[in-house]
Amino acid sequence: VKEIGKPERAVITTCAYCGVGCTFRAEMRGEQLVRMVPWKDGKANRGHSCVKGRFAWGYAHHKDRITSPMIRESIDQPWREVSWDEALSHTATRLNAIKAQHGARALGGITSSRCTNEETFLVQKLVRAGFGSNNVDTCARVCHSPTGYGLKQTFGTSAGTQDFDSVMDADVILLIGANPTDAHPVFASRMKRRLRQGAKLIVIDPRRIDLVRSPHVEAAHHLPLQPGTNVAVLTAMAHVIVTEKLADEAFIRERCDWDEYQDWAAFVADERHSPEALEAVTRVPAADLRAAARLYATGGNGAIYYGLGVTEHSQGSSTVMAIANLAMATGNIGRRGVGVNPLRGQNNVQGACDMGSFPHELSGYRHISDGATRALFEADWGVALDPDPGLRIPNMLDAAVDGSFRALYVQGEDILQSDPNTHHVAAGLKAMDLVIVHDLFLNETANYAHVFLPGSTFLEKDGTFTNAERRIQLVRKVMEPANGMSDWQVTQALANAMGLGWSYSHPREIMDEVARLTPSFAGVSFARLEEAGSLQWPVNAAHPDGSPIMHEDGFVRGKGHFVVTDYIPTDERTGPRYPLLLTTGRILSQYNVGAQTRRTENSIWHDEDVLEIHPTDAENRGLNTGDWVRLASRTGETTLRALVTDRVAPGVVYTTFHHPSTQANVVTTDYSDWATNCPEYKVTAVQVAPSNGP
Ligand code: SF4
């Protein structure tokens, strides 16, 4: 037993793992963190936590952490440790030279959903005001960008509608493409509490997730759809609601565009959209689908929660809009117990999107082409901004291969491991003149980097994170940065080395700038956050104490907007060579690509990715649990062990993507959401065969 010693002081801060946003007392002895205790007054967690936030913080002191800047002329040379001054001046000189030779649009940056709002805001400001382009994107590109698009189109704002507590007033919970017991455990506990009180649960998921049947909780309906058919399932549910006259026409007439509703209702009412007509596509028994639709429409308050099983599809944005259509058609918007709620993956993915990390939007989701918005920023920043949207991550990589994109600053993301089609990402990075990785560890992307700037953990910085319920919470510095600078200071130092003359002395000044320039954050300041504990945006004159529930009196965009969403099958098809469909997810003890959790001292963090396969498919291939298998797609192949289970349906296999040794994204394809380029991680045609191991 390791002697941890009695704590001498404590700092309240916010978890840096998932979008639940639990707050903790970080208990210190001298400069050493001895334990993380879930904080009873935390508004998102109320004294609860999961295993990651409570125990998986050892990565902060891990021997793999890089604490000195490093540079090299080319990626086949060894790294050379240098001083901060040399690293920053070398990087700035190269950025300025590339800009002078190839133009501003040859440069870009990627913000991190693990960093604070203030750090993210500075990276996008550096790209727009310093590099001179709008080539800024974020990891939401590969997870919730369809949420941003779909909810903005239908409701007028790119965020979930409810606070977490609202679930305690739900009568029917419709869970689609999300597995909260593994990915959002503290919220899942609250949901289970409500289910134990008698709320009904509908699960739409190709896999039998734990919530379908667990102690004291059993879903009323599990619709195990064929991966890639979300829109067909939701259209069939809408068909039942409209044709059986279960829609809330009074709500629709008052709150939504009635003409659009009628167009949408006529579309979904068509017989080709009935559950029976679509059964061959969805593989969901029509009777089950009808029963689920009736329950959602008539069971009282209906609340929809969804995750990446909705967004990471070629129809991700259509699925988000189909969900919003369903909520509006049944009047399930604008009060407690209802709503449409994306369960955000990373701790600050909501905040990263809010802060202007997309190439077409400034903070607060205002389009870069809007002259009045641009003028506001130009006056404050003292520079002219490019009026045209910049490149998304996949377009930056394409442009690098073509030679028109030359330099990339990546803060806190490992795009080589997390983005689809690893070979394509590698080719794009390799083609660039300058790749700057700003991270805790030499990650996979750093194999293609020329500059490594050491990053800081959430324990080493002040700032704010925004969780999945739009709750802005303080992150407080628990210990001094191992590398001497918090991430916001590194970005500021780089900006100043390029000649920008920034002078922030604390992240609170960055938040003041965000509030000055962003209407939904107008009433946010560190002082108000200290006083209130947290605030849910919008915080402004109309809502000085924030907004736990959105769209109460009317939609942000005015009238709710019904969008016709026709089911279009993905181009990724099974066939004789690739007869199975692969879908992906997470486990409770790991976090994304595992960079932090795998560097924590405890055996539960040293597992491996496995491939779940149905007994029939396993038997056909002579496979047993524990056997090595070769998983191959049209894009690539990898090797991992099999887990034979009927949690997945025949014809479907499932794995996680936490370990670099597996590199699950070697097999995923280039197909992506039509509106946002979010990769289609959840549908890949594959073959599985016995293997002798890696
Ligand atoms: Fe951290 Fe999420 Fe776990 Fe809470 S539920 S402790 S925010 S990982």
Image (cartoon, rainbow, N blue to C red):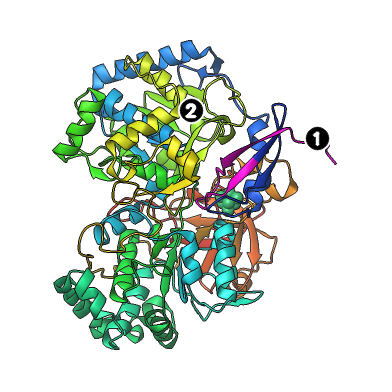
**Residue assigned mark 1:** 5
340 lies left or right of 608: left
The amino acid pointed to by label 2 is Asp
389 lies left or right of 613: left
- Tell me which residue sits at (44%, 65%) in the image: 305
The span picked out in magenta is: 1-25
The numbered dot on residue 487 is 2
Q: Which of marks 2 and 1 is nearer the N terminus?
A: 1
618 lies left or right of 473: right
In the image, residue 268 lies at what x, y percent? 25, 78
In the image, residue 60 lies at what x, y percent? 63, 33
Please tell me whether residue 31 is drawn above or below residue 605 in the rendered image: above
Q: Which of marks 2 and 1 is in front?
A: 1
Using the rendered view, name the quadrant where residue 517 is placed: top left
Label 2: how many Cα within 10 Å (few below 14, some 14–19, many 20+): many
The amino acid pointed to by label 1 is Gly
Magenta stretch encompasses residue 11: yes
In the image, residue 140 lies at what x, y percent? 40, 47
372 lies left or right of 229: left
Q: Cα distance, mark 2 to mark 1? A: 30 Å
